[in-house]
Image (spheres, grey):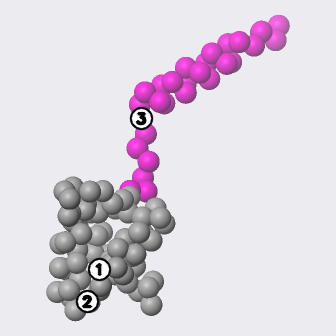
Amino acid sequence: MTTKYKNLVLEKIKESTTITDKVLSKKLASDGYVISDGFFNQLLLDLEIMGLITVSWITKDTRRIEIVSNQEEEDEVENSNKKMIEKDYESSFPNGK
């Protein structure tokens, strides 16, 4: 049963990529899903532990919920550093002549 609600909450978050907890609970209520605060918090905690979302505090009473992107951004500096290290490593060997 909780898997159904986890999927439902995750779909609502994916619709807007970032959302506040208050807006999310209002969207769920407007769709006919009345969820207690404790169960709602447990769902958010489970999704955060699974690595699907991040939850951060905006104000004292409001939390921002964001989808964790699966795409890793490639950093140009890291790529150039890797190439430089590979060149240094290869040049450290004496020639085979």
Q: Identify the residue under disc 2.
A: 34
Residue 91 belongs to magenta span: yes
In the depicted view, which residue is nearer to us: 60 or 2?
60
Residue that appears at 55% across and 27% down: 82
Relative image position of residue 45 (x, y in whole percent) = 41, 69
Amino acid under label 2?
A: Val
Magenta range is 69-97
Residue 18 appearing in the image: no
Q: Identify the residue under disc 1.
A: 37
Closer mark to the observer between disc 3 and disc 2: 2
In the figure, 35 relative to 50: above or below?
A: below
Q: Secondary structure at mark 3?
A: loop
Cα separation, mark 1 vs mark 3, equals 40 Å
Closer mark to the observer between disc 1 and disc 2: 1
Relative image position of residue 54 (x, y in whole percent) = 36, 59
Q: Secondary structure at mark 2?
A: loop
Residue that appears at 19% across and 72% down: 22
Residue that appears at 38% across and 63% down: 53
